[in-house]
Image (cartoon, rainbow, N blue to C red):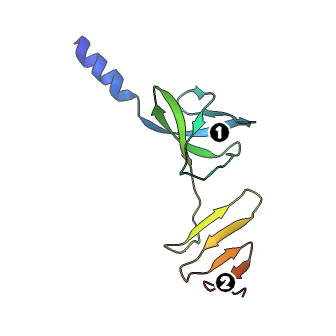
Amino acid sequence: MWISRQISRVQEEAPVCKGRVTLNDNGSLEAVSTGIERNLEVFSPYGYSYSIPTGDDMLLAKCDGQQCAVGVKMNNSGLPLGEIMISSSSGAFIRLKNDGSVEINGLVIDKSGKIL
């Protein structure tokens, strides 16, 4: 009986959960998920840095016994399959298009480097 209670308790804690950013102040990140998570570390692909705006949803995972942020919920509406877009909350963007061109804030550069 004791063992079954311990097993069910462990299974209740999800290794990955969704959280919402409640504070991002000078590198100190806080989110609410099943509880309040403070001083979260954020992990991303090498070379990518970002500061998550308050109110955004993020994915939290267990890392060395503590929660860490592993990504934010993306919005890919209107983006064709295979294309990649990097954008900021102010609306600035870089879009890598399927035809080999790059679009930067509306300026299009074809794959040969010519500005269209």
In the rendered view, does 66 fall on the left or right side of 8? right
Which mark sits nearer the N-terminus, 1 or 2?
1
In the rendered view, does 107 fall on the left or right side of 66? right
Of 16 and 69, nearer the camera is 69
Q: Please name the amino acid that badge 2 sits on.
A: Gly
User: Label 1: how many residues lie within 10 Å, few (<14), some (14-19) or many (20+)?
Assistant: many
Q: How many marks?
A: 2
Q: Residue furthest top?
A: 2
> Who's the residue at 74% across and 72% down the image?
105
Residue 86, quarter of picture: bottom right
Of 109 and 65, nearer the camera is 109
Give me the C-alpha separation between circle 1 and circle 2: 39 Å
Q: Position of residue 99 (x, y in %)?
A: 55, 83
Q: Position of residue 21 (x, y in %)?
A: 65, 39
- Quarter placement of the N terminus: top left
Image height of 94 relative to 22, above or below: below
Q: Secondary structure at mark 1?
A: strand
Residue 27, quarter of picture: top right
- Which residue is labeled 2 in the image? 113
In the rendered view, does 5 fall on the left or right side of 110? left
Image height of 72 relative to 12, above or below: below
User: Label 2: how many residues lie within 10 Å, few (<14), some (14-19) or many (20+)?
Assistant: few
Q: Please name the amino acid that badge 1 sits on.
A: Val
> Who's the residue at 58% across and 77% down the image?
97
Residue 92, quarter of picture: bottom right
- Quarter placement of the C terminus: bottom right
Q: Position of residue 57 (x, y in %)?
A: 60, 45
Judged by depth in the image, the label closer to the viewer, 1 or 2, is 2
Q: Secondary structure at mark 2?
A: loop
**CB within 8 Å, label 1 to label 2:** no
- Which residue is labeled 1 in the image? 21
Q: Which mark is residue 75?
A: none
